[in-house]
């Protein structure tokens, strides 16, 4: 990078406005500025002068049409000149409209006979493509040609499969080298884009039958490395994509592990933490460090640290595709966790090197916004940022055959982007699922434009993590000593009624409510309960844990489980384990056998949810029609699913969630013969027990009664 020495600086902040920062020693009373022009210097109208400390700020207007892609010079009355840099104009609507590009060919278009490169860099005055051999030896540097809309292109004849490449862009007289933001394959540690032949990375796919009702989904969140890294996982290629291909794996107790276990458990969707190329794990030494993957580096290319051969860019692509098809072969769909709200490092990102100032959101004072907490928020409301996000999501769906997306910090994104993305994704795969974190974060986007939970009804087919469900059921995530329903908090009783009905006051349809009590973020539920009630016996703590999970699986909406939740997953009380070692993050497959009874219990809950549609009604009208609450008292949340024979094998269902220790309640079942299907520690799916109409409720947990 070349350092430019300027005696003063000039910035184009609007199409007709130039801001000049002049050192005080250069100031005089008759200061004037001009735009150098072939037909003579064009004077600038100074409309405001402001003392800003060491400099004087001149705000000037002009009537010329500034030509982007060429260096424009500003000169003062003494003939001292400086280049006109691209300033805040890049974030104006006029700039956005002038340089919007609708083409679908950014990046590399490979053919055996020729290769086409295209990159969007509207403020660059020159762009080059730098070509490297596979051993990273430079081959040549080629000048690219500028076209309308700020797109630069280059076509070379010949077969360039396997070659590495980068772009060089000159913006504001500074050259910077960047990896192609649209690179679908990258070298180890993401240093270069790699040219691949898509036909050579294809994997045979299994077409799953349509997923008729999204309320039928049961989502299981997992991390590629956590899934197999434990010593008792039974998987040989630990921490790798291909561990998910291993069949009939078992732990030392001969119980199933891996993908076979997931099929037995009965979940419908696996949500994978980010698998696009991310920072902070050295792919040469992947076991030396750990990361969840929320540090995006390259969005279109898969992460190399999970690959058996991270130096082979095409092999990692095939491995990811094979992983997805392995799950599909077991009847399990795949949701990808995607991070379109920030990058790992703004200054070092390809976005900032190619089009500085455009891709990120700034406040009214020109400071980068920080709603994400990492110093940069992507400006999804800008046309080419929106295009990038949608292009990327559609690419993963078309090329990798995935079945949905989970959007990290979705509240940073804008409603129009998510609405357009939703339409494009559902056109590709109508039964796909889109969900995300609708937290209201401190970013300059107006509140009515944010994809936050309070705006959920503007996006009726997108699902939101229900933080009220999480905190009301298990207790506050951020105040570990604030109890939830499962610990007997009576003040949340009325909220619980809303939650088990799919939170109709918050959402427009039940599928919008992602019901959960733990995820990769924050403490696992087991660790939180241990901190909150360490004096309680293990048995009581397990009962509360089982109660919370049963509420998740039997409530209206979409249930979401954290991998290992069903066998009391612990992270040894580490709250934020994003870079903790494997020993903290792994799924302990020995616990899968140690707590086998609980695994079977959760498996039974899943079977019952699948068996009867009354637990997953598709709209609030049906929920209001069929759900009636039975008032007993606030430690006993009881409700009847009445006249539901059209949705499953039972005509009437009564659900009771009980949270009080050493206290017995009596409930009166309506007349008729009732069967006990679920108790706090047993699922009676194959041998339901006939019960009297006067029933004792005396254990912490869930009871389900049905009438055939």
Image (cartoon, helix red, strand yellow):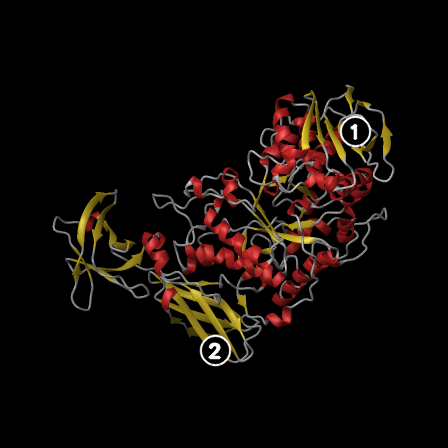
Work out which quarter of the rendered image holds the N terminus and state it.
bottom left
Residue 700 appears in view: yes
**Residue toward you, 564 or 578:** 564
**Residue toward you, 233 or 483:** 483
Local SS, label 2? strand
Compared with 128, 552 (above or below) is: above
Identified at 41% across, 42% down, the residue is: 444
Local SS, label 1? helix
Instruction: Give residue 704's position: percent from left, percent from top.
Output: 77, 32
Q: Is residue 446 left or right of residue 246?
A: left
Instruction: Give residue 301's position: percent from left, percent from top.
Output: 57, 61
* Residue position marked by numbered label 2 in the rendering: 156
**Residue toward you, 635 or 668:** 668
Work out which quarter of the rendered image holds the C terminus and state it.
top right
The circle on residue 200 is none
Residues under labels 2 and 1: Cα distance? 69 Å
Q: Quadrant of residue 681?
A: top right
Residue that extends furthest to the left in the rendered view of this protein: 30
Residue 475 appears in view: no
Q: Is residue 343 left or right of residue 14?
A: right
Query: Tag 1 or tag 2, which sits nearer the N-term?
Result: 2
Categorize mark 2 by other alpha carbons within 10 Å: few (<14), some (14-19), many (20+).
few
Identified at 43% across, 39% down, the residue is: 447
Compared with 568, 131 (above or below) is: below
Instruction: Give residue 155's position: percent from left, percent from top.
Output: 46, 76
Number of dots carrying numbers: 2
* Residue position marked by numbered label 1 in the rendering: 539
Instruction: Give residue 439's position: percent from left, percent from top.
Output: 52, 39
Q: Is residue 73 left or right of residue 512?
A: left
Categorize mark 1 by other alpha carbons within 10 Å: few (<14), some (14-19), many (20+).
few
Q: Quadrant of residue 602?
A: top right
């Amino acid at each position: 990078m070349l350092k430019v020495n300027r005696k003063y600086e000039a910035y184009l902040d609007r199409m007709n406005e130039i801001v000049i920062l002049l050192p005080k020693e250069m100031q005089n009373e008759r200061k004037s500025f001009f735009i150098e022009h072939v037909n003579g210097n064009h004077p600038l109208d100074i409309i405001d002068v402001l003392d800003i400390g060491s400099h004087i700020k001149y705000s000037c207007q002009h009537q010329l049409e500034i030509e982007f892609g060429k260096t424009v010079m500003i000169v003062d009355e003494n003939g001292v000149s400086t280049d006109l840099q691209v300033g805040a104009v890049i974030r104006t609507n006029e700039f956005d409209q002038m340089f919007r590009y609708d083409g679908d060919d950014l990046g590399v278009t490979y053919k055996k006979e020729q290769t086409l490169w295209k990159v969007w860099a509207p403020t660059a005055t020159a762009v080059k493509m730098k070509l490297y051999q596979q051993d990273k030896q430079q081959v040549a540097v080629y000048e690219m040609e500028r076209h309308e809309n700020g797109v630069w292109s280059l076509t070379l004849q010949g077969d360039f499969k396997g070659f590495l490449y980068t772009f060089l862009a000159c913006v504001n007289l500074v050259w910077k080298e960047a990896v192609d933001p649209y690179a679908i394959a990258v070298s180890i540690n993401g240093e270069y884009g790699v040219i691949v032949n898509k036909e050579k990375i294809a994997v045979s796919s299994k077409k799953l039958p349509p997923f008729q009702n999204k309320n039928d989904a049961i989502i299981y969140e997992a991390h590629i490395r956590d899934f197999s890294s434990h010593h008792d996982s039974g998987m040989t290629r630990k921490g790798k994509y291909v561990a998910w291909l291993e069949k009939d794996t078992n732990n030392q107790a001969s119980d199933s592990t891996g993908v076979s276990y997931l099929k037995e458990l009965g979940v419908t969707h696996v949500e994978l933490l980010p698998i696009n190329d991310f920072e902070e794990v050295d792919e040469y030494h992947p076991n030396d460090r750990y990361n969840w993957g929320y540090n995006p580096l390259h969005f279109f290319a898969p992460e190399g640290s999970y690959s058996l051969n991270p130096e082979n860019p095409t092999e990692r692509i095939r491995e990811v595709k094979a992983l997805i098809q392995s799950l599909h072969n077991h009847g399990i769909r795949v949701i990808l966790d995607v991070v379109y709200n920030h990058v790992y490092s703004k200054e070092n990102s390809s976005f900032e090197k190619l089009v500085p100032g455009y891709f990120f959101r700034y406040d009214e004072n020109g400071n980068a916004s920080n709603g994400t907490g990492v110093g940069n928020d992507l400006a999804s409301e800008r046309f080419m940022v929106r295009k990038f996000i949608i292009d990327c999501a559609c690419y993963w769906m078309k090329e990798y055959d995935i079945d949905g997306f989970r959007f990290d910090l979705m509240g940073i994104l804008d409603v129009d982007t998510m609405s357009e993305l939703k339409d494009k994704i559902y056109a590709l795969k109508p039964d796909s699922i889109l969900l995300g974190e609708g937290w209201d974060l401190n970013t300059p986007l107006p509140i009515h434009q944010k994809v936050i939970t309070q705006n959920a009804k503007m996006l009726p087919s997108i699902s939101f993590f229900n933080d009220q469900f999480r905190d009301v059921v298990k207790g506050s995530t951020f105040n570990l000593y604030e109890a939830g329903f499962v610990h007997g908090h009576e003040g949340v009783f009325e909220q619980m009624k809303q939650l088990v009905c799919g939170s109709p006051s918050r959402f427009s349809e039940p599928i919008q409510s992602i019901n959960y009590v733990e995820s990769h973020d924050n403490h696992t539920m087991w660790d939180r309960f241990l901190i909150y009630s360490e004096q309680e016996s293990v048995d009581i703590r397990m009962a509360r844990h089982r109660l919370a999970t049963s509420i998740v699986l039997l409530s209206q909406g979409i249930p979401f489980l954290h991998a290992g939740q069903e066998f009391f997953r612990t992270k040894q009380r580490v709250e934020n384990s994003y870079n903790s070692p494997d020993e903290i993050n792994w799924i302990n497959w020995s616990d899968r056998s140690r707590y086998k009874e609980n695994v079977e219990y959760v498996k039974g809950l899943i079977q019952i949810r699948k068996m009867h549609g009354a637990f997953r009604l598709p709209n609030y009208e049906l929920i209001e029609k069929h759900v009636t609450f039975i008032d007993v008292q606030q430690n006993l949340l009881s409700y009847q699913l009445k006249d539901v024979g059209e949705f499953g094998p039972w005509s009437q269902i009564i659900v009771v969630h009980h949270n009080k220790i050493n206290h017995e309640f009596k409930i009166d079942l309506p007349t008729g013969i009732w069967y006990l299907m679920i108790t706090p520690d047993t699922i009676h799916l194959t041998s339901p027990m006939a019960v009297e109409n006067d029933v004792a409720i005396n254990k912490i947990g869930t009871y389900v009664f049905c009438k055939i």
